[in-house]
């Protein structure tokens, strides 16, 4: 999860110029984080079942965590927008702007930080 997040940061440092991959990397980092949270809360079985059924998607993970009262309802809209943006990049050849990437970065960092605060220590 952190590796994908760090790779996404390389785009902001100017090491890369396309923004679509940033959206995909951040989405993947979020997906890994949500899987980890599901495992922490419910064990390995739900993830194994979802993989077996080929249903390991953002919305299924969010639904599991929402049912457990884990996901902040205020984050639901951002998660839906991020999923839509990622799907447009992957399936519709959409080329997002830097502003889209910055928005996705802030959303993913905010959500991951809630559950894994040690990954992003406060900057001095």
Image: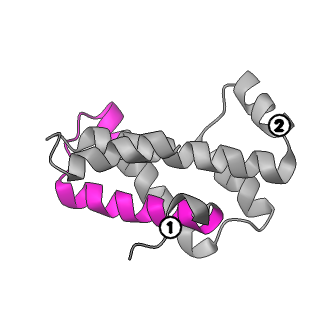
Residue 118 coordinates in the image, percent (x, y):
59, 62
Which residue sits at x=50%, y=63%?
Answer: 120
Numbered badge on residue 6: none
Residue 106 coordinates in the image, percent (x, y):
38, 65
**Which picture quadrant has residue 20?**
top left
Relative to 116, say whether 122 is above or below: below
Which residue sits at x=46%, y=73%?
Answer: 122
- Residue receiving disc 1: 121
- Residues drawn in magenta: 88-115
Q: Are marks 2 and 1 in contact (CB under 8 Å)?
A: no
- Label 1: how many Cα within 10 Å (few below 14, some 14–19, many 20+): few
- Label 2: how many Cα within 10 Å (few below 14, some 14–19, many 20+): few
Q: Secondary structure at mark 2?
A: loop
Task: Verify whether residue 109 appears in magenta.
Answer: yes
Relative to 49, say whether 16 is above or below: below
Reading the chain from its start, which is encountered first: label 2 or label 1? 2
Residue 113 coordinates in the image, percent (x, y):
55, 65
Is residue 28 visible in this depiction of the protein? yes
Most foreground residue, 29 or 119: 119
Q: Main secondary structure of the magenta part?
A: helix
Residue furthest to the front in view is 124
């Amino acid at each position: 999860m952190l590796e994908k997040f760090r790779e996404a940061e390389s785009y902001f440092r100017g090491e890369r110029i396309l923004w679509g991959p940033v959206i995909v990397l951040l989405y993947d980092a979020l997906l890994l984080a949500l899987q980890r949270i599901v495992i922490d809360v419910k064990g390995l079985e739900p993830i194994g079942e979802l993989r077996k059924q080929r249903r390991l998607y953002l919305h299924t993970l969010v639904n599991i965590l929402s049912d457990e009262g884990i996901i902040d309802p205020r984050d639901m809209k951002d998660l839906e927008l991020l999923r839509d943006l990622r799907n447009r990049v992957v399936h519709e050849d959409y080329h997002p702007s830097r502003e889209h990437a910055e928005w996705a970065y802030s959303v993913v960092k905010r959500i991951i930080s809630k559950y894994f605060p040690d990954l992003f220590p406060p900057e001095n």
